Amino acid sequence: MSKPEASKKRIQAIRGMNDLLPGQSALWQYFESQVRLLMQRYGYDEIRTPIVEQTALFARSIGEVTDIVEKEMYTFEDRNGDSLTLRPEGTASCVRAAMEHGLLHNQVQRLWYQGPMFRHERPQKGRYRQFHQVGAEAYGLEGPDIDVELILLTARLWKQLGLSEHVTLELNSLGSSEARAAYRDILVAYFEQHHEVLDDDSRRRLSTNPLRILDSKNPDMAPMLAGAPQLLDHLDDASRDHFERLTAILDSAGIEYRINPRLVRGLDYYSRTVFEWTTTALGSQGTVCAGGRYDALVEQLGGKPTPAVGFAMGIERLILLLETLELVPQDATPPLDVYLLGMDETATRAALLLGERLRDRLPTCRLQVHCGGGSFKSQIKKADKSGARLALLLGEDELAHDLVTLKFLREEREQQRLAQSELVETLESLLATP
Ligand code: HAM
């Protein structure tokens, strides 16, 4: 290919990174506004952190021998030779920022965030390389009450979105790190007895991260995994007590859950409570929200010991779920109310000014002024295509007498000519009735 031709070739988006098009953004906005309101109602404050951090932050918190750190991070050297990484998740950044700004000094913090995360995974439905999470993190609280609060908050969101019937809560406890280390030895001994059944991936994990073998979806290993010793039977007393109190509050709150002893999560920072909300409606990428306790992380990153718990949900998966289940609210994409057009250049200028006056007086009215000229016929066509309910027309005659012509685009009603001074009142009453 010659150089000029090559430079004309269209550049495409990066695989696994999606554009959000106008037709879809209303549903995202609907979701995001529900979340924002909910976080406010529970007293969580928003935190925004950069999407790039020092690589060591993620390596030290998520764990060197996790899939995320080993295979999935977008890591690069910047011009100073520093190793930076596009954030693969929000918890590590949240801890870093909270420590850096002294938010964790002997105080309780309830924080939430949303934004893009990056993981170089194999893209498929519900799994992307740039995806978006909403997360919440609570610091300084040790008891299971805060774990329950986070679960109740998510359960309320499912209710508001109409998803309650379609998601299941799975729960487990990973205990203390000492209990986990002791269990790890028991588990490795069990897997070694069944070495012939382990697939290559699991054999590799045997020395690095044996708990993750429990997560394997390989059907040939299923019977062996079903018989594996369970961490829940090897919990330390304090963690067992925490878990029992957690499930007791969930029972009294009427939250249904399934204890899944094989739920271990793919990030190393967890201890005690872990949970996932899953759905069967999305195929293999069915986890829509996941989280748990990470009581050791703040200290591990150089802070004072601080109990912590949180979750993150995948926005793309929840949007897909709403679409799959046809739960998209009708008013997620409200059409225009008014399309205002001027028949010639002078009238267009007047229309722009009238548009501003109407927006001053009618703050909830969705109004668009026609720009770009064109014949009367083509402008009316555009008005119709815009989805607006009403068209307002300004022509030479209207301008000369301070009038405006009101045309009903969706109803069998005669068009009207009215004084511009009556316009606000007329629109108010028309728009009050759907
Ligand atoms: P995670 O399980 O890695 O946890 O991700 C949380 C959620 O993000 C997943 O359940 C899923 O809905 C969504 N998600 C993850 N990867 C992708 C992807 N490649 N494409 C689309 N969606 C995805 C965390 O990130 C932890 N930081 C959660 C947490 C917060 N734990 C405590 N606090």
Image (cartoon, helix red, strand yellow):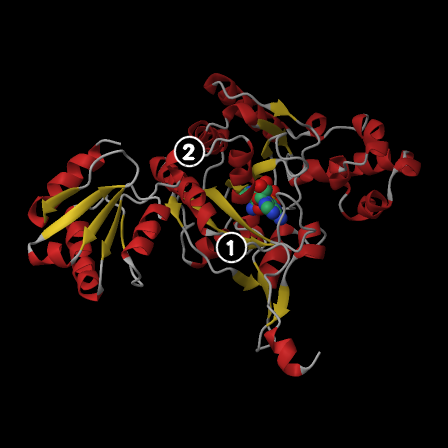
Kindly identify the amino acid type of the residue bearing the numbered disc 1. Ser
Q: With respect to residue 95, does 335 lie above or below?
A: above
Residue lying at the far bottom in this picture: please name it.
Answer: 3
Instruction: Determine whether, in the image, residue 403 is placed left or right of residue 320.
Output: left
Residue ID for mark 2: 329
358 or 83, which is in the foreground? 358
Q: Quadrant of ligand 1?
A: top right
Residue ID for mark 1: 93
Q: What count of labels does the image hold?
A: 2
Q: Is residue 340 visible?
A: yes
For mark 2, does the 10 Å Cα neighbourhood hold few (<14), some (14 to 19), or many (20 or more) residues?
few
Looking at marks 1 and 2 on the same chain, the residue that comes earlier in the sequence is marked by: 1
Quadrant assignment, res 333 = top left
Residue lying at the far right in this picture: please name it.
Answer: 196
Instruction: Determine whether, in the image, residue 423 is placed left or right of residue 204.
Output: left
Q: With respect to residue 19, does 145 lie above or below?
A: above
Q: Residue at x 13, y 39 (%)?
A: 426
